[in-house]
Image: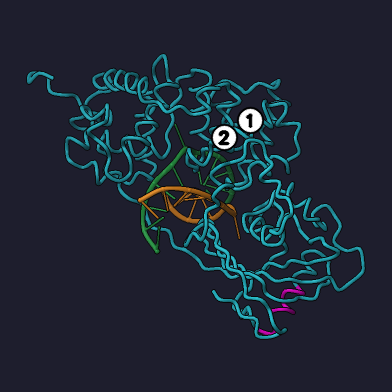
Chain colours: A cyan, B orange, C green
Amino acid sequence: MSRHQPPVRISIANSPGGAAPGDWLPVLQSALRGWFGRQARDLPWRRQCTPYAVWISEIMLQQTQVAAVIPYFQRFLARFPDVLALAAAEEEEVLRYWEGLGYYRRARQLHAAARQVIQNHQGELPPTAAALANLPGIGRYTAGAIASIAFGVPAPILEANTLRLWCRLAAIRSDPTRSSTQEKLWQLASHAAHCSDPGLINQALMEVGSQICTPRSPNCGACPLANICSARHLGLQARLPRPGRKTRYEELREAAIVVHDQGRFLLRKCRDGERWAGMWDFPRCPLEQLDHDSASVRGHLARHCVLLTGAKIKVGPLFATVKHGVTRFRITLYCYHATRANRLAAACDSTTRWISPEELADLPLSVTGRKIARLLTRHGLPDRTQRLPSANPIREAAAPQAAIGRGAAVSRSPARRSSRGNRDRT
DNA sequence: AAGCCGGGGTT
DNA sequence: AACCCAGGCTT
């Protein structure tokens, strides 16, 4: 840059003293093209960028990091290679392939959307952002991402990485969650995507956001956009975007009941509106303020079990305590053995079933459900998770242990010596 | 416009 | 334990 032509910096169009997009847009796009051409990561969905593959990747990537998605993406595409295969599958099998990825509603909506694509769009994903956004699970971001990346439509995107990037590039100090700020951010994103290669530009924006313009200590020295970055010019890059509110956590105490009968376990499918809707789980109930070691807890559990499953049971010993974090909840789950007390054929409808250890491997289970299943079948019984195609090396080889606040931690109860005094160490 | 959805990973 | 993540949906 010469002294007579000071470097142009990105700002919100029409803001006081702000440069018009015409000034910085070509610089931005050109810098992104050059940088992305050299630095783009080699990701599975960039090798196979069919509309279907892009769609699956974008749904999996919602609120989920790239590294966590990769093995799921590969297994999922191997099993459901196209829209027709996905639409033809049972929802439960789709959920089984999603197990461990979280936000299971995404999988159910994806499956429902696949059936809509077969029914209403001749089996082809619609090529416009507006039509895509009519499908379940596809919002403004995902619609723009698929439209631009898979179809070359100049549609804008805004997500965690580009929100942070734009707040810095344009030195946006207002609360980024406010709708007036969101409007400005989408406006900037629209300018950027207005070109002949919007898919490349959108991906490059996200890539710079995730690889260079990181939340803490952005690597401005390696940033292709440093020259036009307003925050860097003002020295504000470490203070933008403005942080949001802290999440307040809620402690929950719950009980899970493992009802045994002839080597099988009683499981139920979580209903719509419940936690883990569509997934299977051991019957569970809130413990409220009940002491998990009190006399009254067993009657409490037995009553709940009848209501949930129709099975009359006799509650036995506590055998494990599982800690599990989910969204803003911190759950402590007390796990009890139980036996069935009635010989009636209760508990055999479509949402309540007696499950053998072998069948357990095929069922989509909640995280804590899978944890309990492992405790029950740890000794030599098969775990289908390890038989899924191209096994996930991260999750299966070295399952995360003893996460503290989040994830799940298990502590087994010591061997039980009498019917009383069973004490859990957590 | 704001919170929830009832996740999971990293630091 | 705080913070983050290729958001969607509801109220």
| Quadrant location, the N terminus of chain A | top left
Between disc 1 and disc 2, the foreground one is 1
Query: Residue at 74% across / 79% down in the picture?
Result: A299
Identify the residue at the far top of this view: A196
Q: In this view of the protein, which residue sits in the foreground, A73 or A23? A: A73
Identify the residue at the far left of this view: A3
Q: Crowding at label 2, few (<14), some or many (≥20) Cα neighbours within 10 Å?
A: many
Taking the image as shown, residue A300 lies to the left or right of residue A191, namely: right
Marks 1/2: CA–CA distance: 19 Å
Three-letter amino acid code of the residue under disc 2: Ile
* Chain on which label 2 sits: A
Q: Position of residue A177 (x, y in %)?
A: 38, 45
Identify the residue at the far right of this view: A344
Of the two numbered discs 1 and 2 on the same chain, state the one appearing first in sequence: 1
Q: In this view of the protein, which residue sits in the foreground, A139 or A75? A: A75
The residue at which mark 2 appears reads as A138
Numbered disc 1: secondary structure:
helix
Query: Residue at 27% across / 40% down in the picture?
Result: A218
Q: Which mark is residue A77?
A: 1
Q: Position of residue A243 (x, y in %)?
A: 32, 50
Three-letter amino acid code of the residue under disc 1: Leu
Range drawn in magenta: A294-303
